[in-house]
Amino acid sequence: MRILVTGGAGFLGSHLCDRLLGEGHEVICLDNFFTGRKANIAHLVGNPDFELVRHDVIDPFKFEVDQIYNLACPASPPHYQFNPIKTTKTSVMGAINCLGLAKRVKARVFQASTSEVYGDPTVHPQPESYWGNVNTIGLRSCYDEGKRCAETLFFDYYRENGVDIRVVRIFNTYGPRMHPNDGRVVSNFIVQALQGQDLTVYGDGSQTRSFCYVDDLIEGFLRLMAQDATVGPVNIGNPGEFTMLELAELTLKLVGGPSKIIHQPLPADDPKQRQPDITLAKKHLDWAPTVPLEEGLKRTIDYFRTQV
Ligand code: NAD
Ligand code: UDP
């Protein structure tokens, strides 16, 4: 198949391009390089099945493709809050442009949605049936509401136009090719520890997240796209739940060195807890994560040793 990956030069997108090419597909990678890097896809340039297009998803695009994966959107809070209006436009206009193209060329289209649609959840762990607890006017809203609106658009195109959609709600994912200055917790802690700096735990560190290794996540993407019946939304994430203090301590244990843990103010609207209920992914996709946090962190640390 010929497959379009928006955001293909980013952390997740570049791993997805690798997997799709490995399975014998042609890949068109569309990216505006806001948070993506040429280094993530440099090894693919020159591959006759790989094409790179510098383009912004808020502007319409036309390609003759069989499938579309829509990943274009900054994912880390400092990046998506840098230009919040642009972030909402990217999610909403990007979804409209991908769906319009999918409708025209009859392509199956995938949306990278997020656990952020659950906001600061009052139901724990979070099943797909939970409607969420999102502040509509906070600093995170540009991302959360943009992604929620994108889901709405996907399901309206599905109901109104019969577009063949797949929607995944991604929980915190980590691994090689995260940007060293990305601002997300796993990359921050590893880079800080490798540089002998203190690890910045925001707040008291009792807030929790559930971390999925990138290879497990991409496997879940492909299984959902291969399915004829399930359109989603489907949670994909690792149910292993850790406090940020536990993550900092584990990172220090694995990296070693002189770093200590220090505390900085908790950002506004920071969700207190997050854990995916993956019953649907297990049932419909026969999917469950396979890489435990300690193993995935070791692989990620090895990558960052080559970067910092
Ligand atoms: P990333 O920032 O590494 O990648 C995003 C990519 O999209 C980058 O290459 C960036 O340059 C590109 N991009 C941003 N705005 C664009 C625009 N307007 N036009 C074209 N390209 C644009 O982030 P990631 O972690 O790889 O996330 C990929 C997708 O998965 C995002 O949609 C994100 O919301 C979603 N997601 C990721 C996580 C996670 O933990 N990594 C969790 C939930 C959802
Ligand atoms: N966090 C932290 N130190 C950092 C970066 C993040 O303690 O240097 C915390 C942050 O407050 C949040 C959690 O780690 O509670 C996950 O943050 P991240 O930005 O990785 O993802 P998200 O909040 O979007 O889940």
Image (cartoon, rainbow, N blue to C red):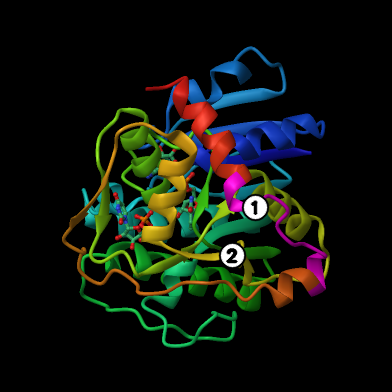
Q: Position of residue 135 (x, y in %)?
A: 27, 79
**In the figure, 230 relative to 262: above or below?**
below
- For residue 65, what is the image quadrant? top right
Q: Is residue 159 magenta?
A: no
Which of the pair 285/278 is nearer the observer?
A: 278
Please give the name of the residue rendered at 63% of the width and 43% of the height, measured from the top-left corner: 295
In the rendered image, the quadrant that contains the N terminus is: top right
How many numbered discs?
2
Q: Which residues are magenta?
A: 283-294
| Element marked by disc 1 | loop
Residue 292: numbered disc:
1
Residue topped by disc 2: 240
| Element marked by disc 2 | loop
Amino acid type, residue under disc 2 in the picture: Gly
**In the figure, 50 relative to 264: above or below?**
above
Amino acid type, residue under disc 1 in the picture: Pro
Q: Position of residue 252 (x, y in %)?
A: 40, 42
